[in-house]
């Protein structure tokens, strides 16, 4: 009897088998798994990063069932603590895209970084969109020239009707690239409002997998949020949705090792008596979400001044670059 009791205890202490497919997750049957896949939740990484309320909405799951499924997905991925040297080793896979200006690249540590969100804010004509156009082209250069490879795809979400394929062609020709191939690798969507903008990012994963997307550009991130939510009464809802939006962008960056470049509008702070009153839209939500935060100002003629406002590893600083017909340069 004692021997049987010991064997039973051993069986009870054995850990349950790790899930392999979505159907292996607790509470997930074939029908629910099919709903999840159709909604873009095709692997454990997406399930593990989701909130219970997301799964409830897309697959009609109960909150408690969704929590159990998410926990099981995280256990299967062994999500938890890891040593800093492991993280350092993983960060060796990070790559950078040249902006076209060596001084601007040096300011942000060598170029626009993958697995990160880089925000550029400033007044109109400060060079934000031009840097975005240049990155869309430069990302398709060979790695040794500061790109990510000729087969690199780009997602460009246009919220202000500023995307110009003619400018992309001009920059590609100047860079010595095939303009037709460069244009075909840039997938553009025009967001009609903030909800549509969020849907475009939520559904971007399929495009990322299909077209080897390594750069996502949103020009600008806050334009529609600013017009759709007017007045102090709508501020809380706006910030909540904006927070969810930028976190989804960071998930894409982390999961697929891609770069995210966003432009942001500004407003004047009337309460500031001295100094530059220019303040980026989005408040603390966007300030905390952006990995690198740049402030662009227009100088004389073609000159632009970039100031690094925030970075997890670099000091504040400034540089001067130029926006010319040939593109962004020193």
Image (cartoon, helix red, strand yellow):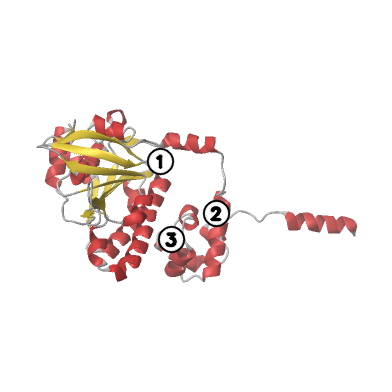
For the residue pair 82 and 41, the one nearer the viewer reads as 82
Left or right: 40 in relation to 178: right
N-term mark: 3 or 1? 3
Q: Which of marks 2 and 3 is in front?
A: 2
- Asked if the residue under mark 1 is in contact with the one under mark 2, i.e. CB atoms within 8 Å, the reply is no
Closer to the eye: label 2 or 1: 1
Work out whether residue 308 or residue 158 is closer to the camera in this orientation and state it: 308
Q: How crowded is mark 1: few (under 14 residues within 10 Å), some or many (20 or more)?
A: few
Q: In which quarter of the image is the C terminus?
A: top left
Seen at 57% across and 45% down, the residue is 81
Q: Which mark is residue 183?
A: none
Give the CA distance from mark 3 to mark 1.
35 Å
In front of the other: 329 or 161:
329
Q: Which residue was labeled with disc 3?
A: 37
Image position of 79 with respect to 243: above or below: above
Whether residue 94 appears in this view of the structure is: yes
Image quadrant holding the N terminus, namely bottom right
From the top left corner, tell me how far across and down residue 147 is, in percent. 29, 34
Neighbourhood count class around disc 2 (C-alpha, 10 Å): few under 14, some 14–19, many 20 upward = some
Relative horizontal placement of residue 267, taking residue 285 as reference (left or right): left
94, above or below 195, in the image: above
In the rendered image, which residue does mark 2 sit on? 74
In primary-sequence order, the first of circles 2 and 3 is 3
On the rendered structure, is 158 left or right of 211?
left
Q: Residue 312 carries which label?
A: 1
Q: Which element is circle 2 on?
A: helix
Say few, some or many: other residues with alpha carbon within 10 Å of mark 3 (under 14 / 14 to 19 / 20 or more).
Answer: some
Q: Position of residue 121 (x, y in %)?
A: 24, 48
At mark 3, the secondary structure is: helix
């Amino acid at each position: 009897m004692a021997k049987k009791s010991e064997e039973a205890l051993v069986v009870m202490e054995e850990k349950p088998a790790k899930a392999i497919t979505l159907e292996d997750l607790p509470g997930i049957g074939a029908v629910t798994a099919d709903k999840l896949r159709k909604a873009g939740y095709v692997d454990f990484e997406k399930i593990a990063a989701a909130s219970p309320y997301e799964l409830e909405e897309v697959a009609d799951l109960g909150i408690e069932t969704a929590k159990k499924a998410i926990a099981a997905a995280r256990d299967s991925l062994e999500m938890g603590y890891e040593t800093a040297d492991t993280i350092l080793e993983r960060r060796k896979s990070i790559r950078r895209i040249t902006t076209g200006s060596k001084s601007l690249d040096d300011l942000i540590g060598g170029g626009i970084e993958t697995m990160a969100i880089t925000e550029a804010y400033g007044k109109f004509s400060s060079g934000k969109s031009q840097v975005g156009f240049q990155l869309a082209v430069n990302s398709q250069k060979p790695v040794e020239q500061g790109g990510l490879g000729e087969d690199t795809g780009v997602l460009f979400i246009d919220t202000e009707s500023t995307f110009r394929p003619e400018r992309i062609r001009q920059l590609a020709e100047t860079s010595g690239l095939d303009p037709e191939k460069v244009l075909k690798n840039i997938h553009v969507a025009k967001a009609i409002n903030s909800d549509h903008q969020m849907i475009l990012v939520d559904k971007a994963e399929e495009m990322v997998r299909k077209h080897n997307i390594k750069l996502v550009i949103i020009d600008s991130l806050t334009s529609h949020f600013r017009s759709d939510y007017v007045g102090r009464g709508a501020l809380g809802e706006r910030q909540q949705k904006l927070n969810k939006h930028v976190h989804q962008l960071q998930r894409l960056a982390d999961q697929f090792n891609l770069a995210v470049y966003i432009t942001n509008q500004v407003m004047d702070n009337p309460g500031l008596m001295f100094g530059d009153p220019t303040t980026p839209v989005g408040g603390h939500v966007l300030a905390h979400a952006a990995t690198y935060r740049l402030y662009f100002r227009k100088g004389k003629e073609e000159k632009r001044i970039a100031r690094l406002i925030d970075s997890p590893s670099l000091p504040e600083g400034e540089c001067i670059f130029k926006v010319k017909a040939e593109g962004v340069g020193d």
